[in-house]
Image (cartoon, rainbow, N blue to C red):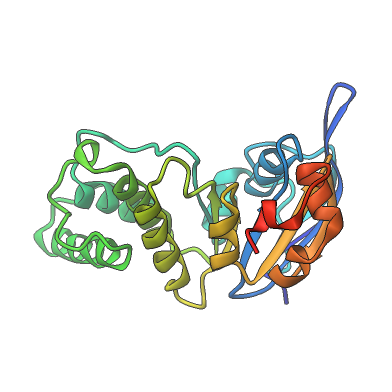
Amino acid sequence: MSVLRCAGLSRSFGALKAVDGVDLTVAPGARHALIGPNGAGKSTMFSLVTGTMRADAGTVALAGRDVTAMSEVRRCRLGMSQTLQHASLFASMTAAETVAVALQRHDGSTISFLPRRQTAVRERAEELLADVGLAGRGAVVAGSLAHGERKQLEVALALACRPTLLLLDEPAAGMSPAERARLVELLGGLPAGVTVLFVEHDLDLVFALADAVTVLHLGRVLLSGSPDEVRASDAVREAYLGTGHREELFGS
């Protein structure tokens, strides 16, 4: 069974068909990239999957369950978690406090002051921080973290929701080459039980991480296949560049 299956998803804004009958299947454990040139419909498609925007037509199924009419919160409860292109954090809270709040909110509990509960949450928060490469940074105020570290903290927050499907919106935006390399290592090292669907403009990162790629163009699926199939596609090259050599796009 697929973790995510979208069938015939469509969304228009007036006369503009931003997403036009898109089918998308994401396999369990996949690192699946959603790419395409500017205006391809990636952001709209991402919003339709997460539930922040309603589709005009089509369905979204999570692990075989139809979630098309469900809110973003209900989808999260069923195992769908996401990070945003621009980090949204409580700047005055420490990294550990931020993750602790996410853990307790996902459990549906209020902030507890019971020592045993506080200890368990704090230990789990530190584990998640270590999982995303922020071991020893729990006491640092989130607003003082470097840009790449804030992105790592957002992944920890998403993992606090115990997702089966993790959605990442341009996770490498604004990162330095060293930060991008750490991100690839982090995402590649996530448990196999966490399936990842990510939108990304950095094609070097896409081909370093993805084992499946779907290319959107003008709101429709141009190609969905392996990274090698996408690299070899003249149609993909032309959609990005119009004309030119494949080397200009993929660097090989």
Q: Residue furthest left?
A: 115
Residue 116 placed where, x, y %?
A: 13, 65
Q: Is 205 in front, or is 139?
A: 205
> Which residue does the image show at 66% across and 45% down from the upper left?
46
Left or right: 30 with respect to 85? right
Would you identify the image quadrant in which residue 107 lies?
Answer: bottom left
> Which residue does the image show at 71% across and 36% down from the upper left?
38
> Which residue does the image show at 15% across and 46% down from the upper left?
140
Left or right: 128 with respect to 231? left
Residue 230 placed where, x, y %?
A: 76, 64
Callout count: 0
Q: Is 175 in front, or is 212?
A: 175
Indicate whether 114 appears above or below 98. Answer: below
> Which residue does the image show at 73% across and 37% down from the upper left?
54
Q: Is 145 in front, or is 107?
A: 145
In the rendered image, is residue 108 in sight? no
Q: Quadrant of the N terminus?
A: bottom right
In the rendered image, is residue 207 in sight? yes
Q: Quadrant of the C terminus?
A: bottom right
Residue 80 placed where, x, y %?
A: 56, 57
Would you identify the image quadrant in which residue 3 lies?
Answer: bottom right
Q: Residue furthest top?
A: 14
Residue 204 placed where, x, y %?
A: 56, 58
